[in-house]
Image (cartoon, grey):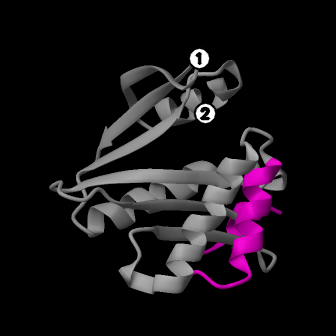
Amino acid sequence: MNPMKQTLYRQEIRPDDLDAIESIVRSSGFFSPAEIDIARELASDRLSHGKQSAYEFLLAESGGQVVGYTCYGPIPATAGSYDLYWIAVSESMRKKGLGKALLTKTEHLILTAGGLNIYAETSSRTQYEPTHRFYESCGYQPQAVLQNFYAPGDSKIIYTKTIK
């Protein structure tokens, strides 16, 4: 049975989603404790402030559990530009198409809200090569590299995609 056929999507965040988001981000093995705290903090902000929050979410559920999510939002003082802050999928659902499905659905939500451009940033470290390939396979192009941004030898790569 295809687990993707049983995946449900929702935008409303719930209190128990905070632990699920933390678990998903932690399961990647890529993120520092501070980054994991930030992922949880953004979800907490949305939970506390609702639609007044700058952060929007799309959560994927399978078997009653959150197995992936995106966090995104409009960039203030721009005309149709959005940041993709997080896209993460639980270890059990990786390499099954959930990341691409989440990204496609998120792009549609952004387009529907009047978005034109999406910006996603990631590390240049070798362990992020699969992330680079993922973005590029979804039509994102590297537009800028900020040398030594995160740490010496760890640059920030900014990927962009124009949606229509």
Q: Disc 1 residue type?
A: Pro
The x and y percentages for residue 47 are 56, 82
Single out the mark in the foreground, 2 or 1: 1
Which of the two residues, 105 or 46, is positioned nearer the viewer here?
A: 46
The kind of secondary structure element at disc 2 is: helix
45 over 33 or under it: above or below: below
At mark 1, the secondary structure is loop
In the image, residue 27 lies at what x, y percent? 82, 50
- Label 1 Cα crowd, 10 Å radius (few <14 / some 14-19 / many 20+): few
Residue on which the image places disc 1: 152
Q: Nearer the viewer, residue 45 or 162?
A: 45
Q: State yes or no: discs 2 and 1 in contact (Cβ < 8 Å).
A: no
Q: Nearer the viewer, residue 96 or 21?
A: 21
Q: In the image, 40: left or right of 56? A: right
Horizontal side of residue 22 vs 35, given as left or right: right
Quarter-wise, where is residue 150 in the image? top right
Mark 2 and mark 1: Cα distance apart in space = 20 Å
Placement of 164 over or under 68, stated as above or below: above
Q: To which residue does mark 2 refer?
A: 131
Residue 133 visible from this viewpoint: yes
